[in-house]
Image (spheres, rainbow, N blue to C red):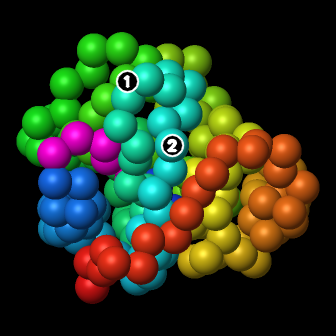
Amino acid sequence: MELEQRNAYLLLGTNLGDRTQNLNTAIAFIEREVGPVFVKSSVYETAAWGKTDQPSFLNQAVGVKSDLEPLQLLKVLLAIEQKMGRVRLERWGERLIDIDIIFYGDVIVNDRNDLHLPHPEMHKRRFVLQPLNEIAENFIHPIFKEKISSILTNLSDELTVEKITKYNND
């Protein structure tokens, strides 16, 4: 059975090395191994979240068309992170690249160990919602039945998320 092509929304984050190049490299891998990227947000600089004693992050949301099954998509994205040199030492620690699946169409998955869709914490995090709102403000969260713009408007996260105009990865 062939899975229909869906729009997946991903969040990329990096706080080590050449952060702009890390985003560009990740997007190139995604285009080759997942599917065509049809939209990219601006790049945002964000103070570290969760573990705050580390460099700030660059974050970017992208929309990609994919016919990979959700768990297969996760495995491909984890392999891209590994190819780029990501080492997982601690939760919320420094990283060359982090690629999270925020939405996979309106698919809901709750796999205890591997995959949760939509991303279970996205609605609490400004660094996810602000770039996502730029490219998918009218997308409706399949569980909350709210638009991204509405979730962002009602968000209590005070973390500073600043659009960076000097970085452009088109």
Q: Given the image, on which type of amino acid does mark 1 rest?
A: Gly
Assess disc 2: are there few (<14), some (14-19) or many (≥20) residues with their C-alpha within 10 Å of its C-alpha: some
Q: Which mark is residue 152?
A: none
Distance between the alpha carbons at the discs numbered 2 and 1: 12 Å
The answer to whether residue 104 is left or right of residue 65 is: right
Q: Which residue lies under the disc numbered 2? A: 47
Q: Is residue 46 magenta?
A: no
Which one is nearer the viewer's eye here, 37 or 162? Answer: 162
* Residue for point 16% across, 62% down: 21
Which one is nearer the viewer's eye here, 39 or 1? Answer: 39
Query: Residue 37: image x %, image y %?
Result: 34, 76
Q: Which mark is residue 93?
A: 1
Q: Earlier in the sequence, mark 2 or mark 1?
A: 2
* Residue for point 57% across, 18% down: 112
Q: Which residues are magenta?
A: 12-17
Q: Given the image, on which type of amino acid does mark 2 rest?
A: Ala
Query: Residue 52: image x %, image y %?
Result: 50, 26
* Residue for point 31% across, 74% down: 167
Query: Residue 9: image x %, image y %?
Result: 51, 62
The answer to whether residue 151 shows anywhere in this view is yes
Above or below, 103 against 95 in this view is: below
The answer to whether residue 103 is left or right of residue 12 is: right
Which quadrant, please, contains the N terminus?
bottom left
Looking at the rendered structure, the secondary structure element under dot 2 is loop
Above or below, 97 against 7 in this view is: above
